[in-house]
Image: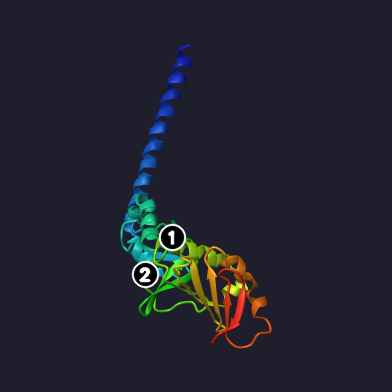
Amino acid sequence: MKKQRKNNDFSKDKNSYILRLGSVILLNLIGIAVCIYFLYGLNLIKIISVEGNKEVPSQEIIDASELKARESMFKVFLSNQKIENRVKSELPQINQITLSVNKFNCVSIKVTEFDVVGYIQVKDRFRSVLTNGAVDPHLKSKVHQNRPIFDQFSTKKQIQQIAEIYQKITPSVKSNISEIKLTHSKVNPNQITINMNDGNLVIGDLTTIQKKIADYSFLIKGKEGKLIIDLEVGVFVKAAK
């Protein structure tokens, strides 16, 4: 009986010793890992890369994130959501953004963008109107040739409305539009005038233009010279003076 008790005590002491030894070894390994992490600069941002952007320059995205090389990686770990929100706030064209870490200290910023549906001209420069109806406040000197200018759309509601309508227009017709102007006459506050790339002029109503302009190619077929296509009330096609 005593011998069995001694064996049990010995077994307990042995297990306790192994547990303490394992704890010491684990703490030492953690200490070594921490030393290596700081000694080799793995705690500092080495590279910041941007993926998925088509129009917004990578440097603008990095600047908006306020991340810099040689800064502490803890800024990424502790402020991840804050950084993502800041970028989307400063750069309205950014739709989604995700921060990730590769190889200990390489930060990757992956983004998706809202497409540009048109532009608002400000003197000799332009602001992008996005698919969600938002206007990017950043001024640009270059624009896409197949995107129209939205003229006289001054309120947020008007801009959102024309952005939504334009996106639903038949692609073959949409690519022929160079400018959409809100001309809102006294008779019709929803009147718009559309300059086409082929030189024709379309007059319409915001509430019906999407449906009516779908027949544009049929309306001008076989006709020569510059035309005025009036779709505001009925459908009238006449030669431009």
Picture coordinates of residue 130 (x, y %)? 46, 65
Residue 204 is situated, as x and y percent measured from the top left of the image, at 54, 70
The mark that comes first in sequence, 2 or 1, is 2
Determine which residue is flagged by label 2.
138
Residue 34 vertical position relative to residue 54 in the rendered view, above or below: above
* Quadrant position of residue 169: bottom right
Give me the residue at 48% from left, 61% from top: 132
Residue 147, labelled with which disc? none
**Mark 2–mark 1 contact, CB under 8 Å?**
no
Q: For this rendering, which residue is in front, 228 or 66?
A: 228
Q: Amino acid at mark 1?
A: Lys
> Which amino acid lies under the numbered mark 2 shown in the image of this protein?
His
Residue at the farthest top position? 1
For disc 1, the marked residue is 157
Looking at the picture, the colour scheme in use is rainbow
Task: Look at 34% across and 65% down and name the residue there.
Answer: 63
Q: Is residue 45 above or below residue 230?
A: above
Residue 147, placed above or below residue 25: below
Helix, strand or loop for disc 2: loop
When the figure is inspected, residue 73 is found, relative to residue 115, above or below; the finding is: above
Q: Residue at x 38, y 60 (%)?
A: 87
Q: Is residue 220 left or right of residue 6?
A: right
- Badge 1 local density, few (<14 within 10 Å), some, or many (20+)? few
Task: Identify the residue at the far front of this view.
Answer: 187
The front one of 1 and 165 is: 165
CA–CA distance between discs 2 and 1?
A: 20 Å
**Relative image position of residue 160 (x, y in whole percent):** 46, 62
